[in-house]
Amino acid sequence: MRAALLSLIVLILGIVPVAARGDLGHPRYRLDATSSFDPYAGETAWIKAHVNLIHGYGSFAREHYVAKGFPTIDYHDPSTEGYAPLTPANRARYMQKVEADKAQGFLGVANDDINFSLGFRDGNQNKASYEPEAKELGLLIEQERKFWPTAIIETNTQWHDLSGRLSDPNVQRMIANSSLIYKEFGVGPTSGITTRADWEALRLFDWHLQWEGKGIVYGGDYGSNTVQANEYTLATELYSTHGHDQYSTAGKYELPPTWWTGSDVDLGLPEGYFFCEAGYCVRLFSAGIVYLVQPGGPTHTFPVFGCSVEWGCPIAVTLHERQGAVFVE
């Protein structure tokens, strides 16, 4: 019965086959363990059940997560923590923090506010001249990689800071030496991803990263923290991933008492079919299906098999632009 339903969906939607790789239907959850999560740091079993990577903060993370064997990266910000404007001397001071992280058992570092374009710079970054700070930013990530070849190096650079500078050698150096690019706000309402062309450009950038064994962390939308934003970002991650992407929610949705259970979805193996045309996208898995409508896409009704945390078990679901739905068989 299921095979017949899948064949019908393929026929109706005109999905084209591509190669399937790996068990990709369960999002790799990256927890932003801010102080709001501190009361739950002792929930060892819960963390093991839900979290793949912890984005931690200093001594608290070392004592409560690293000491318990959880895979954890440590937060640093060259923009607002006294290293800006970035110079060779300030880069050397920043690297002392990275060296300490390695010695203390962290698996890597999370570099916040790696802002290249003048309009995106904050803190004490140089807002009048692109160089020499842009070069220093690229050199910082390169130095981290040379010092710590096996590190998970996550870099938070705003998408529209990157998208117009992908041929810039400073940006290329940063990308080449990062493991993960953090997409702040995911693709939610305040993410800045407001057109189909922009969504497609982000997806193609993600795929390029994954061909090189890297990935995007699709973050939660702190500016519009809703279940709809979560599911749309989740659908985008599940549609795009080839095994290297990660995903997170924001605020209350990543705390144990108010955890969004949609983050626990497991769709199994890719069935080998993608479809993305005319403003809407579909990806089939062995135990479910992902639907989404891109920015500016038309309202569309999709046939459904299975059930969803948010949608129940309908025979069809209607989605508007910038909406996603994930169904498990």
Image (spheres, rainbow, N blue to C red):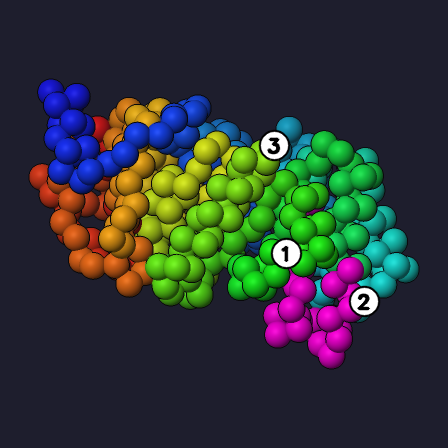
Gap in angstroms between the C-alphas marked 3 and 1: 36 Å
Please state which of the two labelled residues, at mark 2 or mark 1, is closer to the viewer. 1
Between 312 and 191, the one nearer to me in the picture: 191
How crowded is the residue under tag 3: few (<14 C-alpha within 10 Å), some, or many (20+)?
many
* Three-letter code, disc 3: Phe
Q: Tell me, yes or no, if residue 156 can be seen here.
A: yes
Residue 299: horizontal and vertical position, in percent? 18, 58
> Would you name the residue on which mark 3 appears?
70
> Would you name the residue on which mark 1 appears?
167
Classify residue 201 as left or right of residue 178: left
Gap in angstroms between the C-alphas marked 2 and 1: 17 Å
Sequence-wise, the earlier of marks 3 and 1 is 3
> Would you name the residue on which mark 2 appears?
132
Gap in angstroms between the C-alphas marked 3 and 2: 38 Å
Quadrant that contains the N terminus: top left
Residue that lies at the very extreme toward the right in this rendered image: 89
Please state which of the two labelled residues, at mark 3 or mark 1, is closer to the viewer. 1
How crowded is the residue under tag 1: few (<14 C-alpha within 10 Å), some, or many (20+)?
few
